[in-house]
């Protein structure tokens, strides 16, 4: 069973289907092919890692949709989460101004 999930060829992140330890080489099926990526950080189950370098301000794409923008440069194989992505949707617990 694969340990990563990529839904759309435009995705620049993969989702871990099990915890992946830093330094692990994983095979990822994306864009019609298979590539091997060495994960640079520990990736918890359900979290994302970069399939390519993502420049500061660039959209982060998952499931074929923009889920936010990189807050800083994110390297190939790095953990992609709230510490380095500004979400595209307002958080449910954020103040609405009303």
Image (spheres, rainbow, N blue to C red):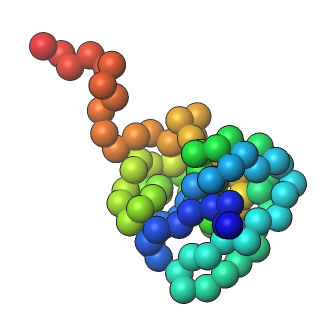
15 relative to 38 in the view: left or right: left
* Residue at position x 57%, y 76% in the image: 30
> Residue 13 at what x, y percent from top left?
56, 60
> Residue 11 at what x, y percent from top left?
48, 67
Which quarter of the image is occupied by the N terminus? Answer: bottom right
Which quarter of the image is occupied by the C terminus? Answer: top left
> Residue 29 at what x, y percent from top left?
61, 76
Residue 79 vs residue 6, the one in the foreground? 6
Note whether 32 is above or below 41 in the view shown. Answer: below
Residue 24, picture quadrant: bottom right
65 relative to 18 in the view: left or right: left
* Residue at position x 82%, y 47% in the image: 21
- Observer able to see residue 71: no
Number of numbered labels in the structure image: 0
* Residue at position x 68%, y 41% in the image: 44
- Outermost residue toward the bottom? 32
Note whether 20 is above or below 30 in the view shown. Answer: above
Residue 84, picture quadrant: top right
- Outermost residue toward the right? 23
* Residue at position x 44%, y 71% in the image: 8
91 relative to 12 in the view: left or right: left
């Amino acid at each position: 069973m694969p340990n990563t999930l990529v839904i759309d060829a435009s995705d620049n992140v993969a989702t871990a289907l099990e915890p992946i330890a830093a330094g692990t080489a994983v095979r990822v099926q994306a864009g019609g092919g298979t590539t091997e990526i060495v994960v640079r950080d520990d990736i918890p189950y359900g979290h994302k890692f970069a399939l390519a370098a993502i420049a500061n301000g660039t959209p982060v794409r998952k499931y074929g949709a923009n889920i936010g923008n990189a807050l800083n440069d994110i390297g190939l194989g790095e953990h992609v989460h709230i510490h380095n992505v500004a979400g595209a949707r307002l958080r449910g617990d954020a103040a609405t101004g009303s």
